[in-house]
Amino acid sequence: VAVTALDPAGMGALLATIATKEDGNTRKVSEVVLIVNPADYFSKVFPATTVKNQAGGYNTNVFPFPTQVVQSTAVPANHAVLGLPKQYFMGLGTSRGGKLEYSDEYKFLEDVRTYLIKLYGNGKPKDATAFVYLDITNLAPAV
């Protein structure tokens, strides 16, 4: 979804899609998370959510709805993810018994033993409408 401003009308439209479950029922939304690339946070989201107050200072992360901003290098440039963190499932596991393997052949000349244990992980939203993928290329600064 292309986003040009983080004003009440724009955020309200995004939150309405998150508040509607995949099956058409609604859910309570009390707080959301905005995951954004660190460079995009400082060049786009920070200017769009920082306003000057009456005392001459600045208020940062001013959103029309309770929003926690998380900077992540895993998010591509010019994009962000808005959603409900409690609606995300992350699973981690190892092979049966967590088998620890080692090798004396590798780096034999340096007299170093190499160890290996594998950890597998996967994550996905519990509901297809719990998160919205945003295009913030044209996000305007706050006035």
Image (spheres, rainbow, N blue to C red):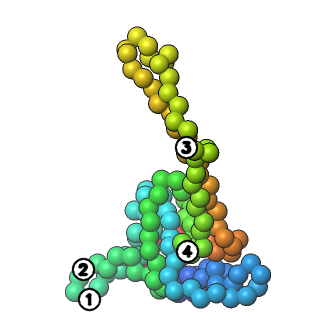
Residues at circles 1 and 4 in contact by the CB criterion of under 8 Å: no
Q: In which quarter of the image is residue 141?
A: bottom left
Residue type beneath disc 3:
Gly
Instruction: Find residue 69 and report its horizontal and vertical position in percent.
Output: 44, 70
Marks 4/3: CA distance? 28 Å
Q: Can residue 2 be seen in this view?
A: no
Q: Distance between the residues labelled 1 and 4?
A: 37 Å
Query: Do the CB atoms of the residues marked 1 and 2 lie less than 8 Å apart?
Result: no
Q: Is there any visible trace of residue 112 in the rendered image? A: yes
Quarter-of-image position of residue 19:
bottom right
Q: Name the residue under label 1.
A: 54
- Under circle 3, the secondary element is loop
**Label 1 or label 3, whichever comes before in sequence order:** 1
Q: How far apart are marks 1 and 3 (CA)?
A: 59 Å
Q: In this view, does 108 lie to the left or right of 139?
A: left
- The one nearer the camera, 21 or 79, is 21
The disc, 1 or 4, on the residue closer to the chain's N-terminal end is 1
Q: Nearer the viewer, residue 107 or 127?
A: 107
Task: Residue under label 3, please give it.
Answer: 98
1 or 3: mark nearer the eye: 3
| Mark 1 Cα shell of 10 Å, populated few (<14), some (14-19), many (≥20) | few
Amino acid beneath label 1: Gln
- Residue at figure coordinates x 59%, y 88% from the top left: 28
Q: Name the residue at 46% across, 78% down.
A: 67
Q: Which of marks 3 and 2 is nearer the N terminus?
A: 2
Q: Which amino acid, by three-letter code, is at mark 4?
A: Lys
Per the image, label 1 sits on a secondary structure element best described as: loop
Query: Which residue matches tag 2?
Result: 57
Q: Where is residue 81 in the image (x, y as percent from the top left)?
A: 57, 66
Task: Say whether residue 53 is left or right of residue 88.
Answer: left
